[in-house]
Image (spheres, grey):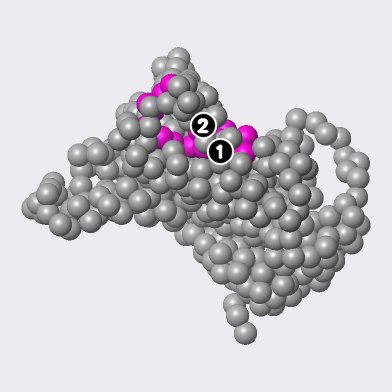
Amino acid sequence: MGKYEELSRKALEALGGVENITHVTHCATRLRISYARKSVVNEEGLKDLPGSAGIVNKDKQIQIIIGPGVHDAYEEFLEISGWREGGAVAAEEEEETGPKNAMYYLNKFGNFVAPIFMPVVPAMITGGMILAIKNLLVNYFGMGVDSGTAQLMLMIFDAGFAFLPVYVGYTLASQLKMQPIMGAFLGATLIAPRFATGTVTDFFGIGIPQVSYSSTVIPIVLGVFFMYYVQKVLKKIIPEALTFFLTPLITMILVVPVTLIVLGPIGNQLSGYIAAFCIWLTNTLGFIAQPILSAIYPYMVMFGLDKGLSPIGIELIANLGYNSVTGIMGFVSNICIGGTALAVATTIKDNKAQKGMIASFGVTVLCGVTEPAFYGALLSRPKALIGTAIGAVSAGLVAGLFGLRTFVQGGCPGYLTLLFFVDQNGGLHYVWIAILVAAIATIVSFAATKVILSRDMKKAAK
C-alpha cells in the first residue's frame, strides 16, 4: 500500500469519480484536480484526507495541500484513479454561476500559470545550487576553474537554465492540451546551435533578428500560444487521414519563422521591460518596497498570484544576473510564517498531538514549504498573521536597506536555500545578509505572535 493510496481513493470518491475529473496536475506542494460538475463534489469528504494538511477549492479546482511529497501523491492518484489526459470522458461541465470579478480572473490566471512553471522549478533549483557550490569550491577550496569537475558542474547549470525555452514550451503546450513535444520542439529551435551561431539570417529574404533566446521565457510563451491557434485552424481544414504528419509539418513551417522574425524579438523586448519596471519599483520606493512586498506575499500565495512571479524572477536573473524583488519577498515571508507557526505551537497546552503537528509545520516552513502551516494553523487564527506581518516588515526593511538579492531562481525559499545568495563570483556577502534577515524574520515573527496570542489568552481567561 503506497503512502498516498488512502488519500487518493478517498479524494477520487469525494470528487465524484474519474468521470468528473477534467485535469490533474501539481505545483510545489499542492495536488491540483480540476472537475466538471461542482454538484457531485463532496467538499466535506475532502477536508480530512489522510496525509493532507487541508484543501483549497477555487475556480472548479480542488487543491489538496500535501507538502514536499506532492509528486508522489500525484503519481499515486493517477495510478489509482486511472485518469489520463484525454483518457476519460468527463461529465458535461456545469455553467458557472458565480460573479466573474477580478478575483475570478486572478484565480484563473494562477491556476493556469502554476502547471507551466512549477514542473520546471526543480531543474532551475538544481542548476542554480550546483553553480553556487562550484563557485564556493573554486573560490574557497582550491578547485581549478578549468578543471573537469568545474566544467561538469557548469554543464549541469547550463542544462537547468539554457534550455528553459524547451522546458516551458513542453509544459505550456501540455497545459493548452496540445502535443507537449511540439512546444518543446519550438523551444529547441530557439536555442538550436545553427541559430545561436548566427548562420540563420533570413527566411525567403526577410531578415531574422539575431537574438539569444537561451534562458528566456516570454518568447517561447508567445510562440506556443501562436502555435495553439495555428493548430486549431489546421485541424479544421486538414483531412483526419492526413493530420498526423501534415499538421505538425505545416505548423512548424508557419510558426518557426513568425516566432523568430516577430514574436521572439517582441518577447525579448518585453523581458527587458519587466526587468526595467522592477528596477524602477525598487528605485522609486527604495528600501520601503521590500517590507511591503514581504508582508503581502502570504496572501499572494493564498490567491495563487505568486505563480505569476516565477517568470518575472527568471527574466530578472537572465537580464540582470540577480533578483532583488520577487526572490526576497518569498524568502522573508516564508521564514516569518515559520516563526509564527512555532509561536502558535507554544501556546497550545491541552492538545499534544495538535501542538506537535503545528510545530512540525513550523519547521517545514522554515525549510521553505508554507502551505501546511498557513492553511492548517494560521488562517484559522487571524491574529497570528499580525505577528507574521510584523516580522515580515521588520526583516523586509533590513533586506531593503542592505539591498539583499538572490542569484538563483528557484522555489520554496527558506533556510535550506541560503546558497541562492552566493553571487556569481562565489562571494558570501549576500549570504551573511540573508542569515541576518532570516534571524530577524524568525525572532520577530515568533515574539510578536507569542505576545499577541498570550494577551488574547489572558483576556479570554478573565
* Disc 2 target residue: 257
Q: Residue at x 91, y 45 (%)?
A: 95
CA separation, marks 1 and 2?
A: 7 Å
| Residue 34 covered by magenta stretch | no
In percent of width and height, residue 286 lies at 42, 19
Vertical relation: 387 (above or below) 269: below
Q: Which residue is drawn at 40% across and 40% down?
A: 191
In percent of width and height, residue 281 lies at 47, 20
Q: Residue at x 56, y 38 (%)?
A: 253
Q: Is mark 1 on a helix, strand or loop?
A: helix
Give the camera-side residue of 67 and 100: 100
Under mark 2, the amino acid is Pro
Q: What element carries label 2?
A: helix
Under mark 1, the amino acid is Ile
* Disc 1 target residue: 253
Q: Which residue lies furthest to the bottom in this view?
A: 1
Quarter of image, res 223: top right
Please tell me how crowded label 2 is: few (under 14), some (14-19), or many (20+) other residues with Cα within 10 Å. Answer: some
Quarter of image, res 202: top left
In the picture provided, is 180 more to the left or to the right than 18?
left
Q: Residue at x 64, y 48 (%)?
A: 246
In percent of width and height, residue 124 lies at 41, 49
Please tell me how crowded label 1 is: few (under 14), some (14-19), or many (20+) other residues with Cα within 10 Å. Answer: few
Is residue 120 visible in this depiction of the protein?
Answer: yes
Give the camera-side residue of 230 and 132: 230
In the rendered structure, are the residues bearing label 1 and label 2 in contact, judged by CB atoms less than 8 Å apart? yes
| Residue 211 covered by magenta stretch | yes
Q: Quadrant of the N terminus?
A: bottom right
In percent of width and height, residue 34 lies at 75, 55
- Magenta residues span 207-227
Vertical relation: 226 (above or below) 68: above
In the picture provided, is 326 more to the left or to the right than 143?
right
